[in-house]
Image (spheres, rainbow, N blue to C red):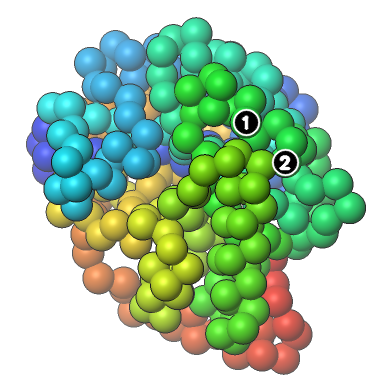
Amino acid sequence: MAHSGAGACIPVLLYHAVMDDPPDWIAEFTVTPRQFAAQLDAIAASGRTPVTVGTLVDGLTGDGGVLPPRPVVLTFDDGFADLPGPTAETLAGRGMPATAYLTTGAITPGGSSLLPPAPMMTLSRAPLLEHYGMEVGAHTLTHPQLDTLPPTALRRELDEPKAALEDVLGHEVGHLAYPHGYNSRAVRRAAAAAGYVSAAAVRHALSSQRDETYRIARLIVRRGHTALDVEAWMEGRGAPVAPFPDSLPTLGWRLYRRARAAVKGPVFAG
């Protein structure tokens, strides 16, 4: 695959749960605590400097932020139960900041989401993430495929989690992650209109200084990935480098999902 030098690319890793015995539906995207520690060792040994998404975006947009020479970003989606406990403690113990994107419907008592059952943190623990040095962003209300929603439903998925997180944290929340990375030009415009200053996609690619702030490329860490895979990403190998246009298969898949959602209603993004 195409790649650029290690200094030009910016690995943005996407983690989900860090646990030994995850539910089947999220197992493919779960790493064990032992794997996680080995991967963090590989990141530390690479000489890269972990930064939050906010720091990355400040560097991309030139808003007064200066990125270190070789940055890396660690992100965590959904809000699994390990996050405000052992996972945040492990990161803090290594002095590694990170960004957590929370699905508020899944972590609010009495709330609902499209995520299947799993051990989740609660919304009231979001301030604890900040205590450990993690930045908190939104990952929608119910975790739908955003690019299949009508405008009113899309606005609700963007507005409500932002307000809920700002209420519990006491400050503005400016960063969003699209569930499963699904987005479109309309979704990106809606994210900006809702007040987000950035949004993370997936793209299975390395980010870069030229990446799009409303479609930040990330690499999903799967259970089969090893410390050697992480080492390759830190060196700028093993994945394409964003930005690049959507492929024809991606566009075709979006059209199919939209047609299906028009018949069946909102679908879990996963």
- Looking at the picture, how far across and down is residue 229, in whole percent? 37, 29
Q: Going 57% across and 33% down the picture, which residue do you hit?
A: 223
**Foreground residue among 114 and 206:** 114
- Looking at the picture, how far across and down is residue 80, in whole percent? 69, 36
- Amino acid at pointer 2: Leu
Q: Going 50% across and 60% down the picture, which residue do you hit?
A: 178
Question: With respect to residue 265, does 47 lie above or below?
Answer: above
Question: With respect to residue 12, does 193 lie above or below?
Answer: below
Q: In which quadrant of the rendered view does residue 232 lie?
A: top left
Check disc 2 and report the residue beneath it: 123
**Foreground residue among 222 and 191:** 191
- Mark 2 closeness class: few <14, some 14–19, many ≥20 residues within 10 Å: many
- Amino acid at pointer 1: Pro
Residue at the extreme top of the image, as rendered? 93
Residue at the extreme right of the image, as rendered? 110
CA distance separating discs 2 and 1: 9 Å
Q: Label 2: state its secondary structure.
A: helix
Check disc 1 and report the residue beneath it: 127
**Foreground residue among 248 and 59:** 59
Q: Label 1: state its secondary structure.
A: helix
Q: In which quadrant of the rendered view does residue 210 lie?
A: bottom left
Q: Going 50% across and 8% down the picture, which residue do you hit?
A: 93
Q: Going 74% across and 36% down the picture, which residue do you hit?
A: 124
- Looking at the picture, how far across and down is residue 254, in whole percent? 49, 79
- Looking at the picture, how far across and down is residue 160, in whole percent? 65, 63
Horizontal side, residue 217 vs residue 170: left or right: left
Q: Is residue 257 visible?
A: no
